[in-house]
Amino acid sequence: MNAPAAPADIGTSGPKEGPSIREGGIRRLHWKYCDHDEYRRRHLNALEPAIVMGAIDHWPALNKWTPRFFRDHYGTRTVTIDGMAWRLDELMERILASSAERPAPYLRNELLAKWPAELGADISPMPDCTRPNYLESPLFPARVPPTYIELYIGGAGAKFPTLHYDALHTHAFLMQIFGVKEYLAFAPDQARFLYPRDGVEENKSAIPDVENPDLARFPLFRAAHGMRFLLHPGETLFIPSGWWHTARIRTTSITVSINTAGAGNWAGFRRDYCAAVACRSRLKSALLAPYMTGLGMLLSLHAQMKGIP
């Protein structure tokens, strides 16, 4: 059975005369008790966001990873944030002292493949709610498939810098290990109010601060409808392909993400992936397109044979 859903609408908030933001309007379910086939049909395939509880209960990281853990075990490691290098022990101290008035630098999109292997063991295997992930197929036509596991560590008051949807129209799964994050999300049909940038950055909004927008400069943003919700430790947030989102940190936070593709977003992913290849070789892209179409059909058929809708 499903866990009780959050209230569909418990009020609105936002800047004066700004967008309509529904508070807490995302569906929440517990992986142990929900219908997994229904979850994949309603969320992965129909592109509806959800928060899944209990999906990462098997991860050692839940009882292990804290800012002090990273400070004590990897303090001499150097990371780069917005072009500036930081020793990790110094960064963790800044993060622990972070506040809304003086937010610490936000370590984000840090590829865990570059870190010691024991960290990967702490978050393995990936939760079943993230699967199937077509990008992991051995038939994928790239030496390094475009699926990444990334680390985010930030202090209270820090923000993700842009409102965006994930590149190549991949799905995003954000697994909260420590602390609380607040997310703001907009459905794909709201894009016309969100001022997408031009060219290769079309997945990013030109509005520099959606919490305090300049409505004289971005008047269409007034008409946008979105939702805001919290993500707590042990919870997994599913942000479907094409959904615009950004985050701010309520309490010192550690998050892990993975991007995926499946039946619900394969068409958009295939289009974007082939377009990216065309920037290097139009001939290769033209040859790749029918292969990617066939690969999607094959992987979908394979998933159905395994009983995955």
Image (cartoon, grey):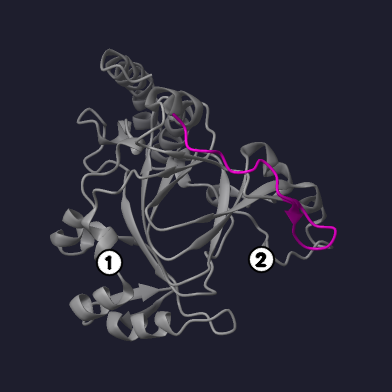
User: Which residue shows up at 40% across the image and 74% down it?
Assistant: 81
Q: Is residue 12 magenta?
A: yes
**Residue 278 in the figure: left or right of residue 58:** right
**Residue 74 in the figure: left or right of residue 204:** left
Mark 1 = which residue?
A: 65
Secondary structure of the residue carrying numbered label 2: loop
Q: To which quarter of the image does residue 256 belong?
A: bottom left
Q: Where does residue 243 sit, x and y in percent of width and height?
A: 56, 42
- Above or below, 171 against 67 in this view is above
Q: Nearer the viewer, residue 160 or 249?
A: 249
Nearer mark to the viewer, of 1 and 2: 1
Of the 4 image quadrants, the one containing the N terminus is: top left
Q: Is residue 100 magenta?
A: no
Q: Nearer the viewer, residue 194 or 23?
A: 23
Q: Main secondary structure of the magenta part?
A: loop
- Above or below, 35 against 191 in this view is above
Mark 2 = which residue?
A: 209
Looking at the rendered structure, the kind of residue marked 1 is Trp
User: Which residue shows up at 38% across the image and 27% down it?
Assistant: 36
Label 2: few (<14), some or many (≥20) within 10 Å? few
**Residue sitting farthest toward the left:** 117
Which stretch is magenta?
1-21
Looking at the rendered structure, the kind of residue marked 2 is Asp
Of the 4 image quadrants, the one containing the C terminus is: top left
- Above or below, 265 against 259 in this view is above
